[in-house]
Amino acid sequence: MPQLKGTGPESDTDAVLAARLAVSATATGGEAMSDVEFFDWLDERRRRHSQEVRHTTFAELSGWHFAADTGDLEHRSGRFFAVRGIRVRTDFGPVPEWSQPIIRQPEIGILGVAVREINGVLHCLMQAKTEPGNVNGVQLSPTVQATKSNYTRVHGGSPVPYLDCFREPRARGHRVLADVLQSEQGSWFFCKRNRNMIVEVGPEVEAGEDFCWLTLRQVNALLHYENLVNMDARTVLSCLPDWHHGTVPARALHSDVAVRSWITTQQSERDVSAELLPLREIEGRGWYRTEDRISHERGLFFSIVPVHVVSNRREVASWSQPLLEPHGTGVAAMLVRRIDGVPHCLVHARVEPGYLDVVELGPTVQCTPENYAHLPPAGRPRFLDLVEAARPHRILFDTVLSEEGGRFRHAQNRYLIVEVDDDVPVEVPEDYQWLTLHQLGELLKYSHYLNVQARTLVAALRTVTGTTGGLLATGVTPPRRGDGRADHR
Amino acid sequence: MPQLKGTGPESDTDAVLAARLAVSATATGGEAMSDVEFFDWLDERRRRHSQEVRHTTFAELSGWHFAADTGDLEHRSGRFFAVRGIRVRTDFGPVPEWSQPIIRQPEIGILGVAVREINGVLHCLMQAKTEPGNVNGVQLSPTVQATKSNYTRVHGGSPVPYLDCFREPRARGHRVLADVLQSEQGSWFFCKRNRNMIVEVGPEVEAGEDFCWLTLRQVNALLHYENLVNMDARTVLSCLPDWHHGTVPARALHSDVAVRSWITTQQSERDVSAELLPLREIEGRGWYRTEDRISHERGLFFSIVPVHVVSNRREVASWSQPLLEPHGTGVAAMLVRRIDGVPHCLVHARVEPGYLDVVELGPTVQCTPENYAHLPPAGRPRFLDLVEAARPHRILFDTVLSEEGGRFRHAQNRYLIVEVDDDVPVEVPEDYQWLTLHQLGELLKYSHYLNVQARTLVAALRTVTGTTGGLLATGVTPPRRGDGRADHR
């Protein structure tokens, strides 16, 4: 007869895992690679990885074409992704209706981090990876970051290392710590989601070239460096079981059922319709196409640009593809305040056209400020002024980080965590709500509750939150902008 | 400073609620209406509700037309719902590609049950409601069952009673016990979902005409009657917090993270594409249209039929609409077995084209057997033979129940719970898994994990599961087919 397992958040195995993660997040000593060795290793990767990305024309985009019937920008294999059009009607935000290009990628990829105990401490297997859209070439990515087209080798490239740890974990005796579908940018992707996995492996799994074992303390410290830990690594990290909440009873402003009810209300009361259109049909509706880009007529939002890539490190040595190039650096900021001593995050129920189910929870502020310059002041994102005016000692996290470099060109957001006090009341507008980090962690066990920007900020919050549940420094000294370490990119 | 609430499944308020629900599910005495009074009341409703449903032609379908450009069957207001086409390609099941008509209803409606303490026992406010597709006129529905078109009164009808209990619960001092979006039939609806709500109200809320207060024991007993508790009531009941699991530590064959990982695997590894098409384009692809129906060329699956309705009880006295009429009675069966003493349900990760995210968990068996008659034996639904051959003493639940009578005409499924033993092994095919009732209850707090047929069976399972977590009779004597009580329909 099989042995049954305890289940639920209070089960022993969960508590043991949380304790092991807490050790990995705090211990110094026992690292497979010291902090100094890591930066030397990273420098070496950057020297060895060469990548040339050249802006080209659509006509020269090898393997891609505008479909005769729809004008959609597609790969000849029908795989990878396509640029299509979308028409959105909504009662949310200052603009009730618009059309735009959007990336359609129906395949579900795998973003996976392998973890393994080394010297009694859990380590994450991170990869130095170059993406064509990165501002700085190499960034730190998950162990595996692969679309289905990648790992079924549509392009005929080399196999994806460590893939089997994630496709067949149980057959190999690995333990799955997290495994959940999560969305990506709903303004740029239509119904895109990836599988976020964390798998504990045994000593038989070793770090190959371009891979290194880092403790959670090290990864968390690196999260404070500009454009170093990539988006895919951040979203996977956010899905790690939260190690801050051992045996302390969870308390919150709103009960869990009240939180879920608020989310359901936001999903139900919003009227949003998003309909894919032939890309051709959005031309003239605010967007135009030239030989080397598709852009908005006022120069806002983003462009679609064709690039040619030559790399010495990818499955395929050279290729062409379109990238989505946002205009301007975004801001993604979470306001955090103590309520009755317990830190709460102010999340925003956001409507983005590409979400699977109308609404996901985003940061307090998520915008590219310059896209709002043409709107009246009432159209300016709420709480942005408060973030921009925050005094330095209230800013707990402030780092510019990159979004997915395989689809976006030079897409960066300034991620901020700002501590507030009575200046932001407990009562907030109906599309905002105060949730604890513990509640965000519970929602992250399920699909499509937190958006990708909020997930980066959950990962960031855990680097500034102590084991007692309070907000406090972890002993990591974040690099200031422009200091030596940040120049490692 | 606000008072914080304990959160998580172990919080005091959750335990108190579970105890109150357990009392309501078991206590005899204190009912607002005795069992005998209920059936008298129901008979009276049936006498007073008159409804005439007449099969008509599409040409006579007032307010509806086939759109000139697409051939879609639409209401002139653009609201309510439309019948469109869909093309499906999948690697799941015996048929890799097909086209079919499908109901598109993008609005999110409210299915809500109000509960209230009467004589110290929680009661549910149930409604006697007639739907045009019901085989038997009146069934027992939730307190509120309304599409957004209903409750925003697009058709200019009378207001929906008790709506404000669900749209503004907190403003009225009500307590939300459950509130979650859940899908409906993915073979007949495209991305349909409704808000399932349970709200505890105070003594100021009284039962109007056509409404009655019943304890959970009474509702659970009525679930064993043919075509009495309607689909909307059953799905809401399944979202009630599970009252069986007080302080007993949860044990299960698979840990919660392993269960979620299995679901994610099923979502990720299946290739399914479902694309809406103009209804006109499915004609000739297995489907044809006559003046009074749209049907499959082999007479399989379902037809779309236009009906004219005259009612003395609805917001509007008479109207026309199309209904989806399935061919044949379906079977939805859950196999249940004890593993190390703990009952587990064998759920099936099902692909249906209308699901929001590829896969939802369904019963062990869900099919209309006659739709498989033209396929080779290997295409026959797995475990169906075992269900059909089950000895009577292993059948814990066996009742024919109706699906949504507002969209489907005479749609019935025979719902079965069958206890098995070593004849079904613990190791099952990869698209099946053994989950405990507690694990199903946890998944039901979140959207789109359990399909609507599985939700009916969760509600049914709770009527045959004792407070110790074992499978045992609750003291309810289920009516046999054809006995006096079942004739009350």
Image (spheres, coloured by chain):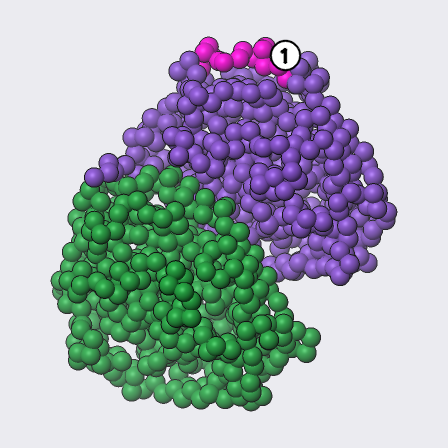
Chain colours: A green, B purple
Residue A357 visible:
no
Q: How many marks?
A: 1
Most distant residue in the right direction: B291
Seen at 54% across and 35% down, the residue is B111
How packed mark 1 is, by other alpha carbons closer than 10 Å (few <14, some 14-19, many 20 or more), is few
Q: Is the C terminus of chain A in the top left, top right, bottom left or bottom right quadrant?
A: bottom left
Seen at 55% across and 45% down, the residue is B108
The percent position of residue A97, horizontal first and vertical second, equals 54, 62
Question: Would you say residue B33 sits in the magenta stretch?
Answer: yes
Question: Between residues A433 and B97, which one lies in front from this camera angle?
Answer: A433
Compared to residue B415, the image places residue B294 above or below, namely below
Question: Between residues B468 and B341, which one lies in front from this camera angle?
Answer: B468
Q: Is the N terminus of chain A in the top left, top right, bottom left or bottom right quadrant?
A: top left
Seen at 31% across and 35% down, the residue is B10
Q: Which residue is mark 1?
A: B40
Residue A273 visible:
yes
Tag 1, which secondary structure? helix
The percent position of residue A50, horizontal first and vertical second, equals 36, 87
The percent position of residue B279, horizontal first and vertical second, equals 74, 56
Compared to residue A342, the image places residue A212 above or below, namely below
Seen at 21% across and 67% down, the residue is A221
Extent of the magenta region: B27-42
Q: Chain of mark 1?
A: B
In the image, what residue type sits under mark 1? Asp
